[in-house]
Amino acid sequence: MTRTLLVIDVQNDYFPGGHLPLWQPEETEARIVDAIGAARARGDKVVLVQHVSPEAEGLFAAGSQGGQIRPAILAAAGDAPVVTKAHADAFQETDLKTHLGGTSELFICGMMTQNCVIFTALSELAHGLTIKVIGDLCAAPSEIVHLIALNGLESKGYVVGTDALGPAQAS
């Protein structure tokens, strides 16, 4: 059984100084960095997603500093592939599926719980995969928005904690 950790949109625009700072982005990023390290130690696949806007300026503008994936995420992920997207659903009009070959369980985390995380988790294009959203590795514009989004996903059995990933394998 192959597992993949999908890390969605941990980009500068969601942090202080960016176009749309989220609730607790630094804390969420630190937990995601740890989860990436543990996933790699277990031999799980890691795939990063980067939202790129066609606009010349603003949120996730192509080539902008705000649109860049956070350096700590890139460092933790090593040579993990980066899928670029223009829609909330990371499967929609992307090559994500090609990076998931052999994956049976897809663990989703990242930004924004109520938008890109939900639309990716519920995507019709994810058919055949067991999808789990790691609730404590996601962030939204506010705590209440985050919790409402997780509640909706939890009612359908999609939400798990970081512990669902399991421990890193001993070397």
Image (tube, grey):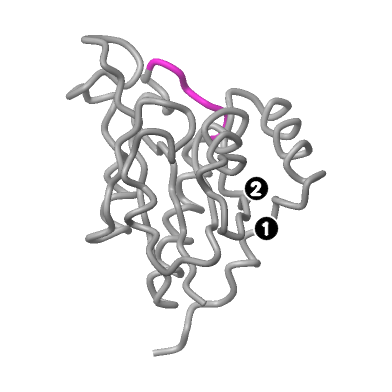
Q: State which tag comes first along the sequence, 2 or 1.
A: 2
**Residue type, label 2:** Gly
Would residue 31 appear left or right of 48 to someone viewing this image? right
Residue at numbered disc 2: 135
Indicate yes or no whether the magenta region holds residue 75. Answer: no
Q: Is the magenta stretch mostly helix, strand or loop?
A: loop
Residue 111 appears left or right of 61: right
Report x, y in % for residue 10: 40, 38
- In this view, 162 is above or below 102: above
Report the amino acid beneath label 1: Gly
Could you tell me which residue is drawn at 21 percent across and 22 percent down? 62
| Residue at 42% across, 28% down | 15
Furthest-bottom residue in view? 171
Out of 30 and 117, give the one closest to the viewer.
Answer: 117
At horizontal 26% and vertical 55% (from top left) the residue drawn is 75
In the picture, residue 58 is in which quadrant?
Answer: top left
Disc 1: which residue: 161
